[in-house]
């Protein structure tokens, strides 16, 4: 049962080959047995899962149907879940039980999805390796000595290890696509505003976006269908009709114009990954796509711009966690200043403190114009590059990451080296574009991903391309040894 995709589970439940309760119990037992190797879960919700599975079986018995009705999933531990710990991977929120469900959680629950638990993550979603979590690092099931990527590494490791078929995740600078690449999954960052951020604890509000992590594009289409849609509770949610993502998966790629930016193939890219990307391009050409070289000239400025904007927004968003209103409170404070200092110093880890300090500096008097305002201007230039490119091509293709997953601890002493691993992913967040990573092969036994980018609200096109690619390749079917 654990090898089934979401689509296969939907068909099996519809054909009464098994019940949601039976499947849920199998996967809960599998998580209990195997997750100690991975550390991919922060909280398991066994009682809730069984209750939801029984309810889904009853709904099916009464004639209801739906691709997510009775399907087991997990939520990244920054989506608020009523009555369940929502920690953001931080000591600061270790004792926080959300009083309400995030819109994404509520929508998926209404569709009949079964919540198995909350997955581990980089603290407050700040990281590219899932090593900054207060609950310990997550291991990559393809090699337990390597990182699974971040910040959605818990969701990625759990799905890759076949502990469950799919999970929710979030992407601020690549945190869905990069873990997908590192663990041989398909991961989709939707257009900014396509998925509600209400109840999703913020890192950088203008960049954060929720999306699906699964083994196939078909499964991502099913999960995104349940997540997407306008939400009046979220002022950044866009009132745009949600298409049937599964309906467009079978469209031909004949004549599809794919742009390949020349800036992607620089000295920083592992040549073995470059070769796999070229192989993916050739496969898509066989399916009828037309390849064109394009340019994104301002890509070189994206990382410094991102690492001003994101920390600036983080410093503002995380100011509420002060030991008074929210979060960890220190013992026996001497006065209010001591309360603030020690509560935040004890509650936040090193990476979060580093980004808060960078952000506060960038927003301070005398530096706002020099750093933050200039970064926002670069953001506009990055967006303009994409708009110009999409006048010539339908989608953009390139590597998801410049290197395969590195060893645990390898970049801990050099945070900037880890930041540079986001070079191909952060531009989509700066511009608000949809992006997808899909499996493209292996380097030294570690998975590699190819990234696709599309114009706003063209998630269906990304899913269509990935699905057609996966019908003609088998990278996404590979399973890590031991799982």
Image: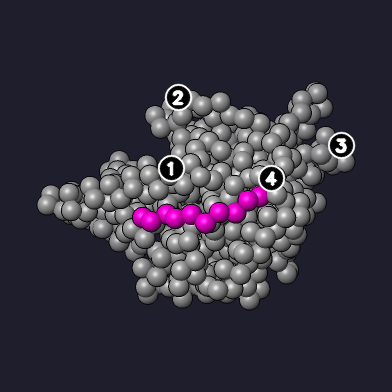
Query: Does the magenta portion include 181?
Result: no
Query: Decide: marks 3, 1 in contact (CB < 8 A)?
Result: no
Residue extending furthest left? 366
Q: From the viewer's perspective, is 399 left or right of 14?
A: left
The answer for how far apart the CA atoms under marks 1 and 4 are is 22 Å
The answer for how far apart the CA atoms under marks 2 and 4 are is 36 Å
The answer for how far apart the CA atoms under marks 3 and 1 are is 48 Å
Q: Can I make out residue 214 in this image? A: no
The answer for how far apart the CA atoms under marks 2 and 3 are is 37 Å
Give the structural element (helix, strand or loop) at label 1: helix
Q: Residue at x 81, y 39 (%)?
A: 11
Q: Quick one: 254 or 167, which is closer to the camera?
A: 254
Task: Please give the residue where the numbered disc 1 appears in the rendered image.
Answer: 387
Q: Earlier in the sequence, mark 1 or mark 2?
A: 2
Task: Please give the residue where the numbered disc 3 appears in the rendered image.
Answer: 16
When asked about the image quadrant of residue 413, the answer is bottom left
Task: Please give the residue where the numbered disc 4 appears in the rendered image.
Answer: 253
Q: Where is residue 53 in the image (x, y as percent from the top left)?
A: 72, 37
Q: From the viewer's perspective, is 335 left or right of 426?
A: left
Around disc 4, counting alpha carbons within 10 Å, would you say few (fewer than 14), some (14 to 19), or many (20 or more)?
A: some
Task: Please give the residue where the numbered disc 2 appears in the rendered image.
Answer: 232
Q: Nearer the viewer, mark 4 or mark 3?
A: 4
Q: Residue at x 44, y 55 (%)?
A: 295
Tell me: residue 50, above or below residue 428: above
Tell me: residue 20, above or below residue 480: above
Around disc 1, counting alpha carbons within 10 Å, would you say few (fewer than 14), some (14 to 19), or many (20 or more)?
A: some
Give the structural element (helix, strand or loop) at label 4: loop
Q: Earlier in the sequence, mark 2 or mark 4?
A: 2
- What segment carries the magenta color? 289-298
Query: Decide: marks 2, 3 in contact (CB < 8 A)?
Result: no
């Amino acid at each position: 049962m654990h090898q089934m995709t979401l689509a296969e589970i939907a068909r099996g439940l519809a054909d009464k080959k098994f019940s949601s309760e039976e499947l849920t119990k199998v996967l809960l037992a599998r998580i209990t047995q195997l997750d100690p190797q991975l550390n991919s879960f922060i909280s398991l919700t066994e009682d809730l899962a069984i209750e939801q599975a029984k309810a889904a079986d009853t709904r099916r018995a009464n004639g209801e149907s739906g691709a997510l009705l009775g399907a087991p999933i997990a939520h990244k531990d920054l989506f608020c879940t009523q009555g369940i710990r929502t920690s953001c991977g931080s000591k600061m929120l270790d004792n926080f039980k959300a009083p309400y469900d995030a819109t994404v959680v509520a929508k998926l629950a209404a569709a009949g999805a079964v919540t198995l638990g909350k997955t581990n993550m980089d603290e407050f979603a700040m990281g590219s390796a899932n090593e900054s979590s207060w609950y310990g690092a997550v291991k990559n099931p393809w090699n337990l000595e390597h990182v699974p990527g971040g910040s959605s590494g818990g969701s990625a490791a759990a799905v890759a290890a076949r502990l469950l078929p799919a999970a929710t995740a979030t992407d601020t600078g690549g945190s869905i696509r990069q873990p997908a690449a590192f663990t041989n999954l398909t991961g989709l960052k939707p257009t900014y505003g396509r998925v509600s951020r209400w109840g999703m604890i913020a890192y950088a509000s203008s960049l954060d976006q929720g999306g699906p992590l699964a083994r196939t594009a078909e499964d991502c289409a099913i999960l995104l269908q349940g997540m997407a849609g306008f939400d009046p509770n979220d002022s950044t949610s866009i009132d745009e009709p949600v298409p049937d993502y599964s309906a467009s998966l079978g469209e031909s790629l004949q004549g599809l114009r794919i742009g390949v930016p020349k800036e992607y193939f620089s000295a920083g890219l592992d040549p073995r990954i470059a070769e796999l990307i070229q192989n993916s391009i050739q496969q898509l050409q066989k399916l009828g796509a037309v390849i064109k070289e394009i340019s994104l000239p301002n890509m070189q400025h994206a990382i410094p711009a991102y690492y001003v904007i994101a920390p600036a927004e983080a410093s503002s968003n995380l100011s509420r966690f002060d030991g008074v209103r929210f979060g960890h409170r220190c013992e026996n404070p001497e006065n209010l200043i001591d309360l603030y200092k020690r509560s935040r110093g004890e509650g936040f880890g090193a990476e979060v403190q580093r980004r808060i300090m960078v952000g506060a500096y960038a927003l301070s008097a005398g530096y706002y114009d020099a750093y933050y305002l200039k970064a926002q201007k670069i953001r506009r230039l990055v967006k303009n590059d994409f708009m110009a490119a999409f006048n010539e091509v339908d989608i953009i293709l390139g590597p998801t990451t410049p290197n395969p997953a590195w060893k645990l601890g390898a970049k801990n002493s050099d945070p900037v080296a880890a930041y540079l691993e986001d070079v191909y992913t952060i531009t989509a967040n700066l511009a608000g574009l949809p992006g997808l990573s899909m499996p493209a092969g292996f380097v030294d036994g570690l998975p590699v991903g190819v990234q696709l980018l599309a114009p706003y609200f063209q998630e269906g096109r990304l899913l269509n391309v990935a699905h057609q690619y996966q019908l003609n390749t088998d990278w996404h079917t590979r399973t890590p040894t031991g799982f």
